[in-house]
Image: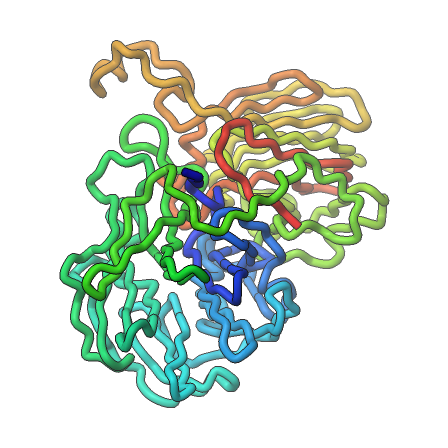
Amino acid sequence: MRTYRNPVIGGFHPDPSVCRVGEDYYLVCSSFEYFPGVPIFHSRDLVHWRQIGNVLDRPSQLRLPPEAVASGGIFAPTIRHHDGLFYMITTNVSEGGNFLVTAERPEGPWSDPVWIDLPRVDPSLAWDDAGDCWLTTSGPRLARIDPASGEVLEGPVDIWPGTGGKYPEAPHLFHVGGWWYLLLSEGGTERGHAVSIARARSPRGPFEPGPVNPILTHRGTPRPIQSTGHADLVCAPDGTWWMILLGARPRGYSPEFQVLGRETFLVPVEWVDGWPVAGPVEERHPAPAAWHPLPPPPVRDDFDGPGLAPCWISVRSRPDGSWSLTERPGRLTLHATGPTLDRPGHTFFGRRQQHHDCRVSARLDPDPGRAGLSVRLDEAHHYDLEVSGGEASVIARIGPLRQVVARRPVDPGPLTLTVHCRTADPLPPSVTSAAEAGAGPVGVGARGPDTIAFSAGGVLLAELDGRYLSTEVATGFTGRVIGMYVTEGSASFDWFDYEGTDDEPVLPVA
């Protein structure tokens, strides 16, 4: 039997939403403080996904002010297709609230925002047989709206509080077999995350809870996939049902640390006595009937094309004068817009880390600026491999502390920089308790999720414990992003390599 491996989209791709048009599936994820926003993917089988763009790819659609906090910005998009038009609705918690955009093609262009004067987050859309458009938000609350103007026509009203878990969120309505089903996540997006279900004859309710709630959760289990929730449902052409949801894969010693962020997982759904049943989410599942593999993504980006691949993201904004592919053809040239990565307003081009074990390299001509590679969670949690003034250095920023942990002279001219993330060796078999672990000679990174090594010109400069670049330390909703930066003058990058060195999946890029 053919099987697929979870996650189907690795790395920081949380809050997934999916829709099907014919035999094609389209999926969007949260992007928080990064620009462009809301990555969009295409698949023919729900397993193999290719990023085809970003829904919010211009400043008129996405404003993230300099004061926008890390893990602010764009929360929890929903994608739907109705009467020949694609809709994406989301919340910019840093500027403006809830809005929707539309497109005739999923690749875009997508419209400028239509704002909706309703509070709360996690908006979702559904249409009834009369053509009325229903908007649900966290709570959950229900309103009837005009999607063309954003006008609220009815409501909002509370419809079902869930089963008592905190933060009832990610409500999606589905009209199946004469019933309106309300899919809801609750318990928080951490280890207590869960998915519940209720149904009614009308979107207005009253809603009755399912006979067994939650219908999916991994809380309190030893499963390697945790924090399962924030789900969406889709029906395949063959009539089978599937759930797309987020989860996390914490690693290391207790309490374990997630460094890739919340990822996108897939699980089959069965209908039993009129109710959907899903889970648990395994690392391997029997595959859907359709099977359309994609070629592996290229390891190297040579920056030879007319534009950037859609996987590249920047922090809050990407000013026109901060970068160029034509100034030095075949290279990405960056110009400093701020003096430090420790505060907003800097030039950074990164991509999501999608494997626990990976190797990233870039060919840098400092030109003669201050530039390098950074492994980033936010302004207060990042490791940098920096070149300036004939010297390469490794800098660790952990909360209020910033320290240069290694430096060495380097020759002038182009230099290859390498960051290698590798999972830590397991604890020695003799270590059976926290007390023994603390007393024994446990090596660097042996209790954390991974070790991050930094090399310049083929020479190892430092190895740092990866736990300090994890959600459990930094807090927030994102995952690691690895990329190129400049904080003084200009710098050019001839190429950038990203290679997963384990067997976990990684999505191809356009």
Which residue shows up at 52% across the image and 31% down it? 396
Q: Quadrant of residue 351?
A: top right
Residue 385 position, x and y percent, is 62, 30
Residue 75 in view: no
Q: From the viewer's perspective, is residue 350 above or below residue 167?
A: above
Provide residue 440's location: percent of width, then percent of height: 29, 10
Residue at coordinates 74% horizontally, 20% vertically from top-left? Answer: 410
Residue 460 located left or right of residue 82: right
Q: Position of residue 412 (x, y in %)?
A: 80, 24
Q: Is residue 155 above or below residue 256?
A: below
- Image point (26%, 81%), residue name: 202
| Residue 22 appears anywhere in the view | yes
- Quarter of the rendering containing residue 133: bottom left
Of residue 482 and residue 355, the one placed in the foreground of this image is 355
Q: Quadrant of the N terminus?
A: top left
438 to the left or right of 397: left
As rendered, which of 429 and 409 lies closer to the eye?
Answer: 429
Q: Nearer the viewer, residue 311 or 474?
A: 311
Residue plotted at (50% across, 40% down): 480
Which quadrant of the view contains residue 293? top right
Q: Position of residue 251 (x, y in %)?
A: 36, 31
| Left or right, 164 with reference to 65 | left
